[in-house]
Image (spheres, rainbow, N blue to C red):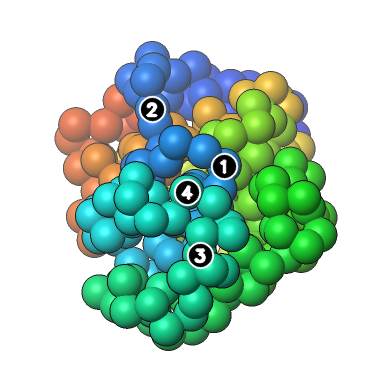
Amino acid sequence: MNKSGLKKYSSEIVKRLAAEYPDVKCHLEFNSPFELLISTVLAAQCTDIRVNMVMTPLYRTKYRSPSDIIKDGIDNYRENIKSINFFNNKAKSVLSICDALVNEFGGKVPDKMDELTSLSGVGRKSASVLLGNCFGKNDVIIVDTHLKRVSARLGLIENDDPEKIENELKEIIPADAQFYFSMRIGEHGRQICKAKKPDCEKCFLNDICPSAFKI
Ligand code: SF4
C-alpha cells in the first residue's frame, strides 16, 4: 500500500477504535504525574494490577512526594515494594529518579521527552505514557507490546525496532490522534487481538485487517 493509501486505511482504524473504546484509560492508578512516573517504572515486566495493589495504599499513606521516598530510604522502600518483580533494581531506579526530581527539576515531574528520558529507568515508552496521560500531549505514540503486535497484524508497520515503529506510525496517524490511537490499540490488544489467539470473529476490524482469521 502506498503512503496515501496507508493514511486512509489508518484513519479508518482510528475511527473504529475511537467508536469501540471511547473512554479508554490508563490501567495504572495515579493521582499525580509523580505517582504515574513511579508506577510506570515499577510496571516494567510486572502487571499493572500488582503495581496498583502495592502502590496505591503507599501513595495515600507514605509516599506523597519524591522527598518522602528519599527520607524513608532505599531499605524501607525496597521492603515496601518487594512483591513487585525486580524490586531491587527498580528501588534503585526510583531513588535515583526522586533524587533527580528534587535536585534538577524542583521536585516536579518534567513535561519534556528529553528530560523524562534522562531519568533512570525511563525510556521513550514510559515518557510517552506520562506526556499523554498527565500533560495532555496528543502527539505521542506509546510503543508497548500490544501496540507492536496489533499494528503489525494490521499491516500498519514493517519494523520491529520501537523507535522506527514510532516514526512509521507518526507518518500515517495525525499528530492530534496519536496518543488516543496508542491507548486504544493497546486496549484492543488486551481485549480482542491477544498475543496467542486473536479473536478475529469478534473483531470490528476483521473486514479490513490483512491478518484476519490467519493466526
Ligand atoms: S482481525 Fe484478528 S488479527 Fe486483525 S486486528 Fe482483529 S483480532 Fe487482530
Element type at marker 4? loop
First in residue order: circle 2 vs circle 1:
2
First in residue order: circle 4 vs circle 2:
2
| CA–CA distance in space, label 4 to label 2 | 26 Å
Residue 139, image x, y percentages = 71, 33
| CA–CA distance in space, label 2 to label 3 | 31 Å
In the shown orientation, is residue 98 left or right of residue 149? right
First in residue order: circle 3 vs circle 4:
4
Q: Quadrant of residue 173?
A: top right
Residue beneath label 1, please? Answer: 33
First in residue order: circle 4 vs circle 1:
1
In the shown orientation, is residue 33 left or right of residue 26? right
Element type at marker 1? helix
What residue appears at the point 52 percent right and 38 percent down from the top-left corner?
A: 32
195 or 190, nearer to the observer: 190
First in residue order: circle 1 vs circle 3:
1
Residue beneath label 2, please? Answer: 24
Q: Quadrant of ligand 1?
A: top left
Residue beneath label 3, please? Answer: 69
- At label 3, counting other C-alpha atoms closer than 10 Å, the crowd grade (few under 14, some 14-19, many 20 or more) is some
Q: Residue 182, relative to residue 74: is it above or below?
A: above
The answer to whether the beta carbon of the residue marked 3 is less than 8 Å from any atom of ligand 1 is no
Residue beneath label 4, please? Answer: 64
**Which of the two discs, 2 and 1, sits closer to the camera?**
1
Residue 153, image x, y percentages = 44, 49
Residue 95, image x, y percentages = 57, 72
Q: Quadrant of the N terminus?
A: top right
What residue appears at the point 65 percent right and 39 percent down from the top-left corner?
A: 131
| CA–CA distance in space, label 1 to label 3 | 15 Å
181 or 88, nearer to the observer: 88
- At label 1, counting other C-alpha atoms closer than 10 Å, the crowd grade (few under 14, some 14-19, many 20 or more) is some
188 or 210, nearer to the observer: 188
